[in-house]
Image: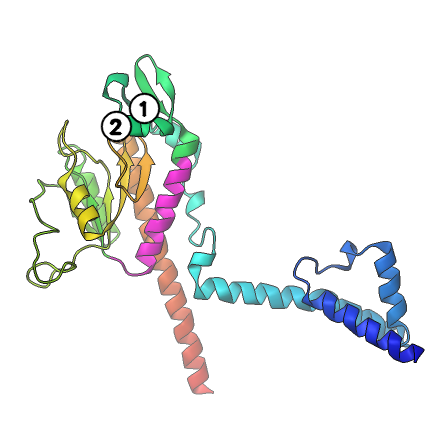
Amino acid sequence: MKRISTLCSCSAYASAFIQSTNSFSLRTLTSHQMFYFKSSMKPLFPSSKTQQSFLRTVQSEPKIQVATLQKNTERENPLLHSDFFGVKSLVTIEDLYKARVHFGHTKGCRNELMKPYLFGCRLGTDIFDLDVTLQHLHRALNFLAHMAFRKAIILFIMKSHQHGHAVEKLAQECGEFAHTRAWGHGTFTNNKINPRELKGGIKLPDLCVFLSLQDTVQDRHLAIDECAKVGIATIGICDSNVNPSIITYPVPANDDSLQSIELFCSLFKKAVLLGKEKRLDIENSSQSVKTADSTE
């Protein structure tokens, strides 16, 4: 009876130890638990070598199984990963500062909805909090990479004679679309047949990226309201004089200087390419697995 009770207690303790996801190392056990664990193992394994082999198995197998399970789960569902595409390594606060992203408009032009994103006011000019800007930029880049990963149609929008060429070049290099001319009223909403399809079978974009929310000095870009009406997700660079309330992923930053626009174009390009490259890698790996299975 004593041998049977020892066997039951040892099996229960070992199974509980293996199933635990919080500690996979014997180092986390207390001295009392370690003594109980070793003493309960002695009747089962007379050989010390066999006992040590079992302990190594108990210690190593859960790590391998959990790591493999986690890796497979992240591969099947990238949304479970905090930074699946590694966009957080693309930009730092120092990069934002050097690109003059922290400069806003004058205090008299401030939109009160942008007040939570401001660090303060210096010589009559609003200054953005770059810590807050970096957080919003990481979210926007992550969402952009996920949309590219899912084969979304991405449209970059900015009406500017100064930066229009850079935006068009950005779209061309990453294989997407751009609109830098005057916006035709009802381009997205003037469609009576299918709200997601324009005349001639041209589909609406899945995501619109605004490098500036302004159409003119005083007016907001018309495409912003149309995206909200038809349910198109938006990413927008929001200066201190705009209303960010209907932008899905607002990024509080300077949208006027050449350095800031070049930085954002570079970051958006890298995020799109990261999403597409990750998709190709997964497709190639799955295709190779299918080919290996078929040959077997």
Expressed as whole percent of the image width and height from the top left, the position of residue 60 reads 70, 66
Label 2 crowd bin: few (<14), some (14–19), many (20+), radius 10 Å: some
Residue 156 horizontal side relative to residue 8, left or right: left
Expressed as whole percent of the image width and height from the top left, the position of residue 288 reads 42, 75
User: Residue 180, labelled with which disc?
Assistant: none
The image quadrant that residue 130 belongs to is top left
- Residue depth check, mark 1 versus mark 2: number of the one nearer the observer: 1
Residue under label 2, please give it: 257
Residue at position x 39%, y 59% from top? 278
Q: Secondary structure at mark 1?
A: strand
Q: Earlier in the sequence, mark 1 or mark 2?
A: 1
Q: Is residue 66 visible?
A: yes
Expressed as whole percent of the image width and height from the top left, the position of residue 235 reads 28, 44
Q: Secondary structure at mark 2?
A: loop
Expressed as whole percent of the image width and height from the top left, the position of residue 127 reads 35, 22
For the stretch drawn in magenta, what is the main secondary structure? helix
Q: Amino acid at mark 1?
A: Phe
In whole angstroms, how far apart are the C-alphas of marks 1 and 2?
9 Å
Q: Vertical placement of 120 versus 281: above or below?
A: above
Read off the magenta span.
Answer: 134-152
Q: Amino acid at mark 2?
A: Ser
Q: How many marks?
A: 2
Residue at position x 44%, y 50% from top? 86
Residue positioned most to the bottom: 296
Residue under label 1, please give it: 103
- Colouring: rainbow
Residue positioned most to the right: 2
Residue 191 falls inside the magenta stretch: no
